[in-house]
Amino acid sequence: MRKLVSEQNLATIVLVHGAFEHSGRYDDLAEQFQKDGLNVIYGDLPGQGKAKGKKGHIRRFNEYVKTIGYWISEADESRPVFILGHSMGGIAVIRAMQELQPLVDGVILSSPAAGILNGAGKPLEAFSHIINKVWPTLRVKAPMKPEKVTRNEELIKRDKQDAMILSKVSIRWYREFKKAIKQSFQQIDLFPNVPLLVMQAEEDLMVDIEKTKEWFHKVPSKEKCYKQWPGLYHEIFNEPEWNSVYNYTLNFIKLHLDRT
């Protein structure tokens, strides 16, 4: 876990990365938040980046939930706390909110993986149920391609050389991820009544936009906002237009700082 402290100490934002990637890809974003007066807490989820454990493997999705709970507990309790989750990290944040009911002042979801595009075909999907019981650590090729998540050519080149981006994930990881998505809908009424901002890439090649909208419309939060970004790919904070996305996010945070 890494913690950036701002002299202004306006609030703390907890950043949760997505599948296949690692927290180092959020260093620039974290430093920008710090410059704008926010403390930042972020790190690698279990089985990813420099975190302990078999790469691309988890036994239970709850490992992510517990990790997020720990990060939140490390925030300055005297100041507001916000949490931002991207893609699978968005689902992990949803499940952490449902399971732990942490005291946070706002939740931000970036292209949350409420539905997966180009997932396993029906034969492999059925086969994965069996393998999950007899050989859960079996790892299969991960479907992430840098050119499918961003239009930023510089980042595409960087990511293709990034050895910490996972190329394989386990069958257990896949089954647990799928189950967490299902639970995010089944237990939607457990999502606490906190200000919610959902931002979705319009040209998303990784997640199903319609499932994002479905989850958003069902969640019972009294104060919620849905923003769809025209022309942007999955990683909205890594797109050429990232500054607009960042400012939109920062304005959401500042709006709710004024109310605390």
Image (cartoon, rainbow, N blue to C red):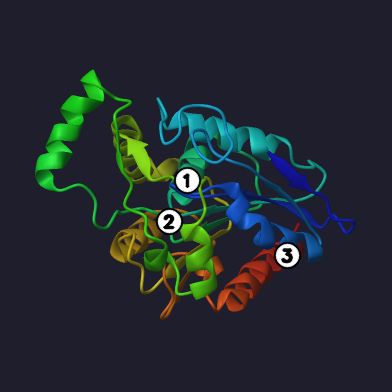
Please name the residue that numbered disc 3 is placed on.
32
Please tell me whether mark 3 or mark 2 is closer to you in this view. 3
Q: Identify the image quadrant of residue 201.
A: bottom left
Which residue sits at x=59%, y=55%? Answer: 25
Instruction: Please name whichever residue, 40 or 218, is drawn nearer the observer in this view of the structure.
Output: 40
If you read the primary sequence from the N terminus, does the residue marked by circle 3 or circle 2 appear first? 3
Q: Is residue 32 visible?
A: yes
Amino acid type, label 1: Ile
Amino acid type, label 2: Pro
If you read the primary sequence from the N terminus, does the residue marked by circle 1 or circle 2 appear first? 1
Which residue sits at x=31%, y=52%? Answer: 143
Please name the residue that numbered disc 1 is placed on.
94
Q: Residues within 10 Å of mark 1 (few under 14, many from 20)?
A: many
Q: Residues within 10 Å of mark 3 (few under 14, many from 20)?
A: some
If you read the primary sequence from the N terminus, does the residue marked by circle 1 or circle 3 appear first? 3
Q: Identify the image quadrant of residue 7.
A: bottom right
Mark count: 3
Which residue sits at x=49%, y=74%? Answer: 153
Instruction: Please name whichever residue, 181 or 226, is drawn nearer the observer in this view of the structure.
Output: 181
**Left or right position of 145 against 29:** left
Q: Secondary structure at mark 2?
A: loop
Please tell me whether mark 1 or mark 2 is closer to you in this view. 2
Q: Residue 112, which numbered label?
A: 2
Q: Secondary structure at mark 1?
A: helix
- Residue that sits furthest to the left in the current view: 123
Distance between mark 1 and mark 2 Cα atoms: 9 Å
Q: Position of residue 82 (x, y in %)?
A: 66, 52
